Image (cartoon, rainbow, N blue to C red):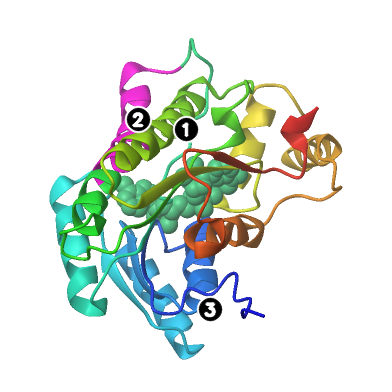
Amino acid sequence: MEALQAFSLAGKVALVTGAASGIGLECARVLGAAGARVMMGDVDHSGCAAAAAALRAAGLDVQARVQDVTAEGDWQASIEATLAAFGGLDVLVNNAGIYQGGTLESNTLEEVRRVHRVNVDSVFLGMKFAAQAMKPGGAAGRGGSIVNLSSVAGLIGVPGHTAYGSTKGAVRLYSRHAAVEFGALGYGIRVNSVHPGLIQTAMGEKVFEDFVALGLAPTPDEAKTVVLGMTAVGRLGTARDVANMVLFLASDASGYATGAEFVVDGGMSAR
Ligand SMILES: NC(=O)c1ccc[n+]([C@@H]2O[C@H](COP(=O)([O-])OP(=O)(O)OC[C@H]3O[C@@H](n4cnc5c(N)ncnc54)[C@H](O)[C@@H]3O)[C@@H](O)[C@H]2O)c1
């Protein structure tokens, strides 16, 4: 019987953006533990360097570099650095993102443009430059898997989420279109989106505070209790919950999945 090594990333190289903290850091840890060599990029370079040093001390093969995902030049430099350091590129996790709260009426045009720059332009640039490297004849040339971090707010309406949710809806369809286009071009590159619910990270805490500002709960703790009640599994989500889904999508075990949405929200959006 053939050996079952469903989630091994041995021999694979991954680039994870926004890897200094939260979900991105956990993705670097989980992909690295599965055998991938991981380039960790973040605009917070000192935080990313410290996080990478801690993962190296735990025996993982990771490096950190400064990368602003809105900067085209940073993308080209990061992919070149990944190829030079690890000799390939098989997995891109477009994780870096920011949250913008407020209502449709209170948001300024600059706030909306900023969150679209960070959350959507980044996904365009990442997929563009990763595909150039991953496609047949590219500098890496082995095909690969691109995982884009969307949100349940990219699938359903949430109060106070028009600016942020519109970016995550764009990430969802960017992923589908890229998956179909790469397939038509014979690139061997899969693209999927991941849709977390409320996850306990710095960003998650900000969302709980915004629920209070909107009058949806009296305190952030009460907001957590409300969200908890909306889940079917009876607990809040962790960065590990999301990273485990990213691991599946990065691995060959998900080889027949592309252009699809993977919800990790404890059942919150199922009702
Ligand atoms: N936490 C949640 O509840 C939740 C839910 C759904 C989706 N998400 C998505 O998951 C992803 C990660 O979220 P998180 O909760 O870990 O957020 P976080 O705020 O905890 O961490 C985000 C990381 O991205 C980095 N970053 C921000 N702007 C950047 C830029 N321009 N270039 C490079 N790096 C940048 C930050 O320095 C930080 O390290 C985001 O795309 C977010 O929208 C989060």
Label drawn at residue 116: 2
Magenta stretch: dominant secondary structure? helix
Residue 221: image quadrant is top right
Which residue carries the number 3 mark? 33
Mark closer to the chain start, 3 or 2: 3
The quadrant in which the C terminus is found is top right
Identify the residue at image location x=52%, y=50%.
256
Task: Tell me the element at label 1.
Answer: helix
Q: Earlier in the sequence, mark 1 or mark 3?
A: 3
Local SS, label 3:
helix
Q: Amino acid at mark 2?
A: His
Q: Which residue is mark 1?
A: 172
In the displayed structure, 229 sits above or below 6; it is above
- How far apart, in angstroms, are the residues tagged by discs 1 and 3? 27 Å
13 on left or right of 226 = left
Q: Which amino acid type is marked by label 1?
A: Arg
- Tell whether position 117 is magenta: yes
